[in-house]
């Protein structure tokens, strides 16, 4: 009977010990599970900000690309507008410069005839005839005033005698032999040339030295 009681006490002690070990094992397993869940949550929390940063960086890069494209288009538009403004200014300037071109060109024959009239009078006749002298002086003065008026408006008379022939500036009418000058040299000017603000409005009519 005492032995049976001892056996029962021992069995109860073993059962209590087994229960304690099982409870401790359960607590350890629970702790491990909680730790694993915490680690997973932490990993998830770390992954979410990294993904968000990458997403924001991609958005920033896209916005920078759009901004550069808009800036380039704006600069191109400004350059086009500036070019158009400069072309318009040049057109206006040329219009002012060459507005008198047609009118001046119509007066060139008058200037030529006045010059020819003054040059055609022999010096001997001028010295002998007072009235002819006064007339010659009047024609010469008129020719000089007309040329000065031309110059005030940018119209210049061009005398190319002795220069090399240039088809852009001169109109060759004939050739003359002249061993004293290089071929292609202008030896005679039949009509003076005229330029308006460095633009030829009438080439000079010339005779040039012929090739040997």
Image (spheres, helix red, strand yellow):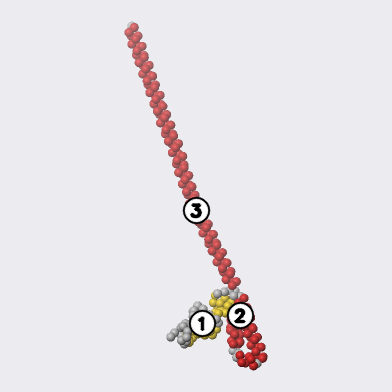
- Residue 150 drawn above or below residue 83: below
Q: Secondary structure at mark 1?
A: loop
- Residue 141 drawn above or below residue 56: below
Point out the residue furthest to the front here. 180
Pick whichever of labels 1 and 2 is earlier in the sequence.
2
Quarter occupied by the N terminus: top left
Identify the residue position indicated by label 3 in the image: 68
The quadrant holding residue 157 is: bottom right
Query: Residue 162 shows which numbered tag?
Result: 1
In this view of the protein, which residue sits in the foreground, 16 or 85?
85
Q: Where residue 22 sits: x, y (%)?
A: 37, 21
Q: CA distance from mark 3 to mark 1?
A: 62 Å
- Residue at x 64%, y 88% (from the top left corner): 136
Q: CA distance from mark 1 to mark 2?
A: 22 Å
Which one is in front in this view, the residue at disc 1 or the one at disc 2?
1
Identify the residue position indicated by label 2 in the image: 147
Q: Residues within 10 Å of mark 3 (few under 14, many from 20)?
A: few
Evaluate if marks 1 and 2 touch, with contact meaning CB atoms under 8 Å apart. Answer: no
Q: Where residue 154 sits: x, y (%)?
A: 59, 75
Q: Where residue 71 sits: x, y (%)?
A: 51, 55
């Amino acid at each position: 009977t005492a032995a049976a009681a001892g056996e029962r006490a021992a069995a109860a002690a073993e059962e209590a010990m087994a229960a304690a070990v099982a409870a401790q094992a359960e607590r350890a397993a629970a702790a491990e599970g909680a730790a694993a869940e915490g680690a997973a949550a932490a990993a998830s929390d770390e992954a979410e900000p990294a993904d968000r940063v990458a997403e924001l960086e991609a958005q920033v890069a896209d916005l920078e690309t759009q901004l550069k494209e808009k800036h380039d288009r704006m600069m191109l538009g400004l350059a086009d507008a500036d070019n158009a403004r400069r072309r318009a200014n040049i057109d206006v300037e040329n219009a002012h410069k060459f507005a008198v071109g047609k009118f001046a060109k119509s007066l060139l024959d008058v200037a030529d005839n006045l010059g020819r009239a003054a040059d055609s009078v022999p010096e001997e006749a001028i010295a002998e005839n007072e009235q002819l002298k006064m007339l010659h002086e009047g024609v010469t003065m008129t020719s000089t005033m007309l040329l000065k008026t031309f110059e005030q408006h940018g119209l210049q008379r061009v005398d190319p005698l002795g220069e090399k022939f240039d088809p852009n500036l001169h109109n060759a009418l004939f050739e003359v032999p002249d061993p004293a000058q290089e071929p292609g040299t202008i030896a005679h000017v039949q009509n003076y040339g005229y330029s308006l603000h460095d633009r030829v409005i009438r080439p000079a009519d010339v005779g040039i030295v012929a090739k040997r």
